[in-house]
Amino acid sequence: MRDPKFRALGGVMMMGALQISDACKTAYTNGRDEVYGRGFVDKLRRKELAFIRLHETMHKALRHLTTYRRLWDIDKQVTNHACDYVINGILVKMDPNETVIAMPRDENGQLIGLYDPRFDGMSEKQVFDILMQEKKDGGGGGDDKGFDEHDWEGASDIPEEEQKKLGEEIERTLRQGLMAGNAAGDLERLFGELLAPKVDWREVLREFIQSVCTGMDDSSWNRVNKRFVGDDIYFPSMISESVGEIVVGGDMSGSCTHYITPFLSEIKAIADEVHPEKLHLMYWDTAVAGHEEYDASNMDSLVQSTKPRGGGGTDPRCVMNYINNHNIKPQCIIILTDGEVGNAWGNDWNAPVLWVVVGNRKIVAPVGTTIYMEG
């Protein structure tokens, strides 16, 4: 925690309870608490123990056990391997000369744990996809020589509201650590990215709309419920022919305008799947400058016919107020913005809100869910 390379992670390291256990074979975290096996840590050198502690801290900082639960439902082992490859690659790169931390080695000097330079710079999802393909081709999906366990079940036992507060605390602590520490350049960028796990914004956007808006009118075996497939249990997915209304708001500040077309193209593609009764498209700056309505009769022309308007100033509360004043009752609200709004996020949204932030991965909205759209 005293080393400037790792100082920004100090606050996350101190979160939750820490336990030394005779029953634990190695080490694990549930995303909040950490458990270390007595026999395991007794064999580690000081720098190796420091590496293990930072490894578990990174699981917490990256929120692996909540962010990648969907991947774990698909393949438990491959997800565990993907997360470990990413963490170990980051830590080795941060201290290549092993001045503070050292990846554990056995009595023959061979590394203990999952490390592969070919995954340098990749996200957990990218590594997962590669390992899954290798597994399908007859490989093992990654050698099973990790030095820690993963308490996914324990993470699931943490109540949803507590999970939300934990995520907010992690994000706040990391931001404070960045301001207080001396990390610079690549390290500062890395810690900034810890605030937002690297996932494809299109995938997260799609999952958000489907999870919030998909109705439960009927069930279908054409689309198996993936939540239980990992346990060899097959249930039908719940489906609905249509959902209610959706609000989509586009920030018209200069930094967002060239993102409008790809953003709306993805919105339109998702709308073709969930069939909203109505899609309210609003363009805003400090006020809602344009409000367009789309339904089944004109949804196909959304991207071609829309007329963005407005510009100057950024206050998303105007969208919130407009929705409330016009008695619009959406099932979800999606806001595209550069996030440069100060404290004007609003707190009276009448539906789940997803912020699609462009240009700055360090911005995290204090209300709703934040994802990041790359150029």
Image (spheres, helix red, strand yellow):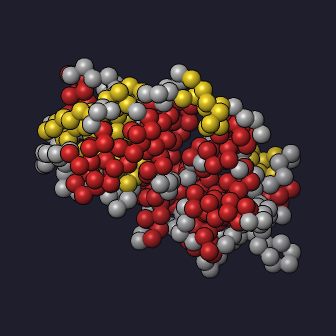
**Place of residue 224 in the rendered image (x, y in percent of width and height, measured from the top left):** 65, 37
| Location of residue 42 by image quarter | bottom right
On the rendered structure, is 97 left or right of 336?
right
Q: Is residue 18 above or below residue 103?
A: above
**Place of residue 373 in the rendered image (x, y in percent of width and height, measured from the top left):** 38, 54
Q: Is residue 172 visible?
A: no
Q: Quadrant of the N terminus?
A: bottom right
**Place of residue 203 in the rendered image (x, y in percent of width and height, measured from the top left):** 48, 49
On the rendered structure, is 370 left or right of 69?
left
Q: Quadrant of the C terminus?
A: bottom left
Residue under the image location 71 percent in, 50 percent down: 75
Camera-side residue: 226 or 219?
219
Residue under the image location 31 percent in, 47 percent down: 264
| Location of residue 135 by image quarter | bottom right
Camera-side residue: 205 or 294?
294
Number of marks drawn: 0
Residue under the image location 25 percent in, 19 percent down: 327
Residue under the image location 75 percent in, 35 percent down: 233
Camera-side residue: 174 or 117?
117
On the rendered structure, is 9 left or right of 25?
left
Q: Is residue 250 above or below residue 246?
A: below
**Place of residue 2 in the rendered image (x, y in percent of width and height, measured from the top left):** 55, 63
Residue lying farthest to the front in this orientation: 297
Q: Is residue 44 visible?
A: yes
